[in-house]
Image: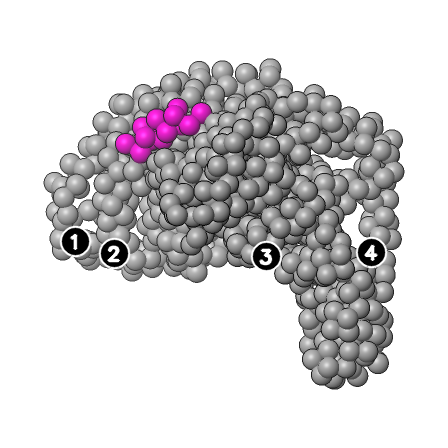
Amino acid sequence: MRRRHGLVALIGLGCLSAAELSAQQGAAAAVQLLRSGSYDEAIAALDDLRTATPSASHLRWYARALAEVGEYEQALEVLDGAPAESGVALANVRGELLLATGDVDEARAAFTRGWEGGAPDAYPSRLNRAILDYDYGDRDAALAEFDTFIDLYNSATVLPARDLIAVARAVSYLGVTNKDLYQDALRAFDEAAAADPSSLEPALETGLLFLERYDGTSADTEIERVLGRNPNHARALVAKAKAMQFNGSMGVMETVEKALETNPSLVEALVFKARLHLAATDYEAAAEELEKALEINPASLEALSVRAAASFLRGDVQAFEADRDHVATIAPDYPELFNDIAELAVNHRKYREAAELAARAVEIDSRSWRGLTLLGQNQLRLGRIDEGKASLERAYEGDPYNPWVVNTLRLVDSFENFGVSETDKFVLVLHDREDDLLRTYVEEIAEDAFAALQARYAYTPPLPIRIEVYRDHADFSVRTLGLPGIGALGVSFGSVIAMDSPAAKRLGEFNWASTLWHEMAHVFHLGLTEHEVPRWFSEGLAVHEQHAARPGWGHQPSPGFLGRYKAGLFLPASKLDAGFVRPSYPEQVVDSYFLASIVFEYIEGRWGFDPILGMMHGYRDGKETEQLIEELLGVEPETFDEDFDRYFSGKFETALAALGPAEGEHGESILPQSPSQAAVEEPGRFTARMEAGLEAYELGDLDEAEEQFRAALRLFPEYGGPSSPYWYLALIHERRGELERAAQALARLNALNESNYEARLKQSEILEELGDTEGAASALESAVFIYPYEFELHERLARLHTELGQHEGRVRERKAILALDPVDRASAFYELALAQQAAGQRSEARRSVMNALEIAPSFDEALELLLELRGGGSER
């Protein structure tokens, strides 16, 4: 589409009578009221105008004003009563109202009448007919019709704003065949805004186009322009909610509800609200919104698609097939039904079904780039790497600007830099730069987790389990969502796990072994329930399994967590899913992980593990949480919530009483007096005690510091965060030479914190000094789970394993040292050969010593060892 220059709006001037001038001024004022969102006043003014002067223009604006607040039927009645000579001029707005109420055939006839009759808005009529045909009829024919708008744009010297908007929308549809046309669409929207600066439609349509083209920031900017002039604009509020969801902002539901306050009949808003409910597995609420939508517009393809998705996700095959077949009848070329269901299936972690549904969408429309993207992403999630890459490459050909496609293809191309090793249960995929270092540790944790979980659940998930470990968090994020920026550390797609390596985060930010255990638990949960388990259940149970696996693993309580409980921010136990999928405050997702794990601690402690297994079987069979609570726990959901709340408040009774309303994550607060004075005045407050202890410690008054830290522990004994009293008590005891007490404090700290690397190193040093070699080695082993990249860590572990006669561990640590590429590789190979010899691995030892001699041919000790190894002896 070529660029035109110097467009100006034509304004008809002539001799107007006083009455005509008054009517024109009144119409302009009414339109301004409408565009500013003063709908009641605008409707009243336009009603007066159309009564006094029932011109087509006044009737059109009046009908549009009624439509803005959802009064579609009333607007149609007004148009039905219009003079016959206004029929053509009102045909387009009539068609839009008919389409909004589901009368597709009559809407098509109205649009045709407006176009063929030469109405003032003939081109918008032609566009609306083409869009209707694109959705409900022949897509190829509709694309040919859209193409005519390029000719319109290129042949006209000047176009009014309404026609420029029609051109822009037509060209945006053509973008499916030529992505460069999206830029032309933006240009035409800009020209429309210049032609009619008071119109809100160009900015709104521009925002929607930006959102469609994956630019959430620009979309939000354009939509805010509309809302800045009309804060009640229902369609703009829905667009705002969609941009917020795209950008990961909170308050999405509230924004949609605000749109429905203006227009309770806005089907787009009702369906979007239903989607939000479905994401939280609230099927009843979703069904309520969808029924409202379909009562207004029985032919809404989006509402029918989302209702079909809800039925599909609930396992209601008959209802799903009924909506599927109905859509196939009224819109045979419409692929979005299967795309919508596939996308919602992903939200419910049903990746196999999502891939199958997306493939159906592509069968219907080979240009469904959305379908190809969903297909490729889910093939990758299923471990079908080559197929997924091929699908995404096809998607890229049609939509080369899709960041999910571009990023994921880039990531898949990088797989050539990963090592792949296989065992009887696992396929391990690690970056070449750390494959040799991490593979053994990853395999050991995976094997331990598999054995423990297999015994606990009496279940074996589909094998092999593919474990991908990414040293770049952005790569892991792309693998998970297609975009960088995810806050998680790991994800399970079933029998495919992706996670960060310890190199992806700063030292002390996470424990990779604990994360792997968490994701292995998901493999069992998803497999056992056939991917029907709600997110709150699976996440909470996975954290519960971390707690059971090793002391300190998994989420632990903090002042911030308990402070938010005191503030009443937590959801009831039976409604926790919303905390994951629709958080209402920044920390809610993380809080929900830990809170859900305490739910399982409570259930297993009171009823045992069998009801938990029973709930998983129930989810697999299509039952919902409230029903399972009643059946397996024997209590009403409301009673369960009340009982759990008592359990929670009892569990943390002392800490809750000791925390003020504004406690920080690390116990900080702003106190008007000195810390020591605050401790005197508020002896029962955890923060006051901690700050007094820190003040005394910094001044060197260890006795006073110990007294304050022990008082803090009595108030909050479960706190193992970065400023835990246990850490300072350990330092105090170490400085006094009280090593056993220091070791005890560190053991308690490390049992409350999975990622405190420094505390584990110090614990190991102190235990070794006390002669507890085994304890020292154990502390260092747990440090490897946090940060395995320091030579000294593995040197110490190798020495401790040697002293303990643990030859396999000694070999592993010597291999780790080599993987870290030491300066003296010859000596590293020699030390590995010694370890392998001690472990009875003579052939491996010979290879290692030969490697040492290849680097340093005159290495005497290595030559002697080689002669010794060649001297014979059977291998173990």
Q: Earlier in the sequence, mark 4 or mark 2?
A: 2
Residue designated by label 2: 194
**Mainly helix, strand or loop, the magenta region?**
helix
Residue designated by label 1: 7
Q: Earlier in the sequence, mark 4 or mark 3?
A: 3
Q: Position of residue 717 (x, y in %)?
A: 81, 60
| Marks 4 and 2, how far apart at CA | 62 Å
Q: Are marks 2 and 1 in contact (CB under 8 Å)?
A: yes
Q: Are marks 4 and 3 in contact (CB under 8 Å)?
A: no
Residue designated by label 4: 652
| Marks 2 and 1, how far apart at CA | 9 Å
**Element assignment for label 2:** helix
Q: Position of residue 311 (x, y in %)?
A: 60, 24
Q: Are marks 1 and 4 in contact (CB under 8 Å)?
A: no
Amino acid at pointer 4: Phe
Task: Give above or below for 48 relative to 180.
Answer: below
* Magenta residues (range): 384-397
Q: Which mark is residue 508?
A: 3
| Marks 1 and 4, how far apart at CA | 70 Å
